[in-house]
Amino acid sequence: MNDENMTMDDLNSDQAILLNRTVTDNYFKYQLKGVVVHNGTSETGHYYAFIKDREETKDDDGKWYEFNDT
């Protein structure tokens, strides 16, 4: 597809929003919910994860738990 011949109909909704500059900074903010960790090489190793609790309290923004089978 040639950029010179594109119309708004050729864009997906995210591209149209960006083109129209109707995006706020919050559009690009994400909240981390989990992390997968790998120790080892590409041929062998061990995986484990840190997962954030979905429930938040007024004192904190959610606790993190380690899930590891070792």
Image: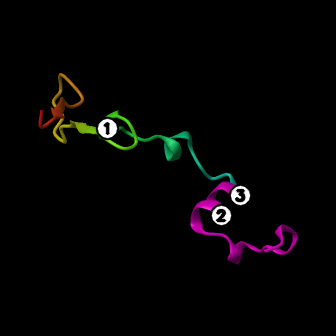
The residue under label 3 is which amino acid type?
A: Leu
Q: Quadrant of residue 64?
A: top left
Asked whether 20 or 61 is in front, the reply is 61
Specify whether 24 is left or right of 21: left
The residue tagged 2 is 16
Which label is found at residue 35? 1
Residue in the image at 69% along x and 77% along y: 9
Residue in the image at 58% along x and 61% along y: 14
The residue under label 1 is which amino acid type?
A: Val
The residue tagged 3 is 19
Measured along the vertical axis of the image, is residue 66 above or below residue 27?
above
Residue 29 picture location, percent across and down: 47, 40
The residue under label 2 is which amino acid type?
A: Ala
Residue 34 picture location, percent across and down: 29, 40
Residue in the image at 42% along x and 41% along y: 30
Disc 1 element: strand
Q: Quadrant of residue 25?
A: top right
